[in-house]
Amino acid sequence: MTVPEKTIQINQSVAILCDGNNIERSIHEISGSTDTMVNFDVLIPKLLGNRGLNRFIYFREGKNISEKLAERLHNNYYGLVVPCHKSADIPLSIKATQLASKVDAIIIMSGDSDYVELVRHLKSEGVRVEIAAVQENTAAILIHEADHFLPITKEHWFTYKSPKGKFRR
């Protein structure tokens, strides 16, 4: 008689905090096109695995934030797009520290070395910290400090094609 294997399921609550400008610039640089964007429908399930999404927040510098993106992230992931006056570093860091006691893991989507101290702080608070970024544009120290690194590659983005006969702004 064989005993069925037990599947261990990890119940973790995860927050994903995205430095939109950093990820967008990295993808544009590697792809060679400013029409290339993150495919969140592919990336988010890969980041989560079997874990539960607590929050998804996309921080974006500037006033020109796509309403379509904001609507899509809200509808599909209850996500929120947060406009930032300058860079996303400070607002993202504040939100991460606010969420530290509410989640088991925080995934920071950025390759910016400015987040190293945040990663260290969150880990000292007992939070698992993962980094998801374009590896070629990610600081080695950030990868080293994180509990896990997931490279964002071509399989995680798409190139936007504007409809024929319409202007894109």
Image: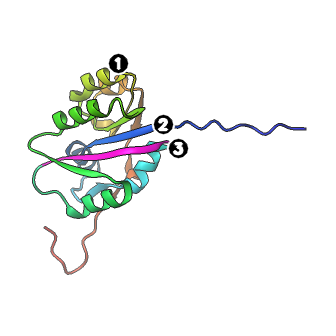
Q: Position of residue 93 (x, y in %)?
A: 22, 32
Find residue 119 and report its image quarter: top left
Find residue 54 and report its image quarter: top left
**Rendered residue at 42%/45% (across/down):** 53
Q: CA distance from mark 2 to mark 3?
A: 8 Å
The amino acid at mark 3 is Asn
The amino acid at mark 1 is Ser
The amino acid at mark 2 is Gln
Q: Earlier in the sequence, mark 2 or mark 3?
A: 2
Residue sitting farthest toward the right: 1
**Rendered residue at 41%/37% (across/down):** 150
Q: Which residue is mark 1?
A: 124
Residue sitting farthest toward the top: 124
In the visual, does 53 lie left or right of 98? right
**Rendered residue at 63%/35% (across/down):** 8
The prevailing secondary structure element of the residues shown in magenta is strand
* Front position in the image: 100 or 18: 100
Of the numbered discs in the image, which one, if any, rests on residue 12? 2
Q: Position of residue 11 (x, y in %)?
A: 52, 37
Magenta highlight range: 51-61
Q: Which residue is mark 3?
A: 50
Q: Position of residue 29 (x, y in %)?
A: 23, 47
